[in-house]
């Protein structure tokens, strides 16, 4: 089968389209023939070595497809079922083996497999951020950075479902338009405008209850200045680079702020929690209450181009790879 291998850390050029053996499912595992693999920013960190994974390895962690073989002891899934997942190393491939406990059933008459592949990781991220990390309520105002990105567009929609007011940031007018369509009440072009001043102006000087910040290095300090007293700084990514160490005294000076740095794994720690988030998302998509924008569809062999586009800020919504 074909797969995207990383034989050494580096830029997109290290992604190598190779022949590898089809993996065999072990006990408690399922083999899936992929309909689509999701591209996520974390894949770029694993490729570059920012998140250490020893090469050689097959990249990817998210996808959806049809069960092709089941290992011993698997009762929940059978050959022919459609499934999706957010956490299975080696998903940039034609086939992947996934622990059954990481799989979610997909009703493909309601949600296409490639849409399910597109929704899992970023959808569950937007879900935990808005429902659990800082559970939004009516009356809250949230600042969402990179609001037209994969997580961003879903975050805007879910924040609106919770009744919050959403201020978004984006790099271009076109991206701002997409985020407004996803529900953002106000948009700031943070490449041209000072997002701290704009957020203060929009909120009448008060600031926001929470900042969902996936951009990291270039926005972190400003994000703290956008918060109300006792506001929540939720740093969940680093698209512009990692945030340097912070003097905690700053949180006192800026108003008794809270800071957290969560990951999806912390919020899908039990099977029950994983199914709650994944099934909520799939059912909203099936009922047309959540739109998943697939902003780029690439052949598996073009994974390097998908990475260039993602890191080059050229993309909106979700990118998927088709084996
Ligand atoms: P996005 O689709 O959001 O792409 C990244 C966007 O970030 C760009 O399009 C760009 O939007 C913005 N950006 C701002 N500065 C830069 C920069 N210097 N370089 C590149 N992009 C920049 O990606 P994802 O939705 O896949 O992921 C968003 C972030 O969320 C990532 O940092 C990822 O690691 C994180 N994440 C964290 C999870 C968690 O559980 N903690 C789970 C999933 C994702 P613009 O042009 O509008 O500024």
Image (spheres, helix red, strand yellow):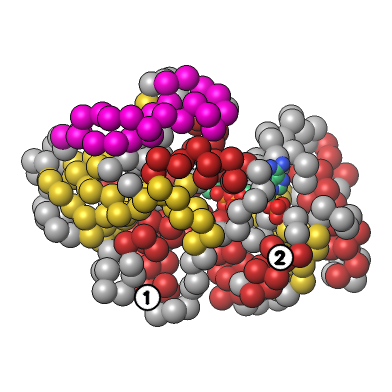
Q: Measured from the top left, where is residue 11 in percent x and y?
A: 57, 28
Q: Which residue is mark 2?
A: 174
**Relative to residue 63, is residue 110 depicted above or below?**
below
> Which mark identifies residue 299?
none
Task: Give how far apart the Cα atoms at labels 2 and 1 are.
Answer: 27 Å
Query: Is residue 76 shown to the viewer in this render?
Result: no
Q: Report which quarter residue 245 is drawn in.
A: top right
Q: Measured from the top left, where is residue 198 in percent x and y?
A: 88, 63
Residue 243 on the magenta span: no
Q: Measured from the top left, where is residue 289 in percent x and y?
A: 47, 78
Query: Is residue 37 shown to the viewer in this render?
Result: yes
Residue 181 relative to residue 154: left or right: right
Q: Report which quarter residue 115 is drawn in.
A: bottom left
Front residue of 256/284: it is 284
- Count of labels in the image: 2
Q: Nearer the viewer, mark 2 or mark 1?
A: 2
Q: Which residue is mark 1?
A: 286
- Quick one: SS at disc 1? helix
**Magenta span of residues:** 1-24
Which residue is drawn at the image coordinates 82% and 53% (left, top)?
Answer: 191
């Amino acid at each position: 089968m074909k797969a995207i291998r990383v034989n050494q850390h580096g830029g997109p050029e290290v992604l190598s389209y190779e022949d590898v053996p089809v993996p065999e499912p072990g006990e408690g595992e399922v083999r899936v023939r992929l309909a689509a693999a999701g591209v996520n920013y974390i894949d770029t960190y694993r490729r570059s070595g920012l998140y250490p994974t020893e090469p050689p390895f097959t990249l990817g962690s998210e996808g959806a497809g049809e069960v092709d073989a089941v290992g011993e002891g698997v009762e929940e899934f059978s050959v022919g079922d459609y499934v999706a997942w957010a956490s299975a190393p080696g998903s940039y491939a034609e086939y992947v083996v996934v622990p059954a406990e990481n799989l979610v059933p997909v009703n493909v008459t309601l949600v296409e497999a490639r849409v399910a592949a597109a929704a899992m990781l970023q959808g569950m991220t937007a879900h935990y951020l808005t429902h659990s990390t800082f559970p939004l309520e009516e009356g809250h105002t949230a600042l969402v950075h990179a609001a037209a990105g994969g997580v961003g567009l879903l975050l805007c929609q879910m924040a609106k479902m919770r009744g919050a007011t959403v201020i978004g940031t984006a790099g271009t007018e076109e991206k701002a338009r997409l985020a407004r369509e996803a529900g953002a009440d106000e948009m700031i072009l943070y490449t041209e405008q000072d997002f701290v001043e704009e957020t203060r102006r929009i909120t009448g000087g008060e600031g926001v209850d929470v900042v969902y910040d996936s951009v990291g290095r270039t926005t972190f300090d400003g994000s703290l200045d956008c918060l109300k007293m006792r506001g929540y700084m939720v740093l969940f990514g680093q698209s512009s680079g990692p945030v340097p160490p912070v003097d905690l005294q700053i949180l006192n000076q800026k108003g008794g702020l809270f800071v957290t740095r969560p990951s999806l794994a912390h919020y899908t720690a039990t099977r029950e929690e994983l199914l709650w988030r994944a099934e909520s998302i799939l059912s909203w998509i099936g009922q047309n209450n959540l739109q998943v924008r697939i902003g780029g569809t690439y052949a598996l062999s073009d994974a390097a181009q998908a990475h260039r586009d993602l890191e080059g800020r050229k993309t909106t919504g979700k990118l998927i790879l088709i084996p």
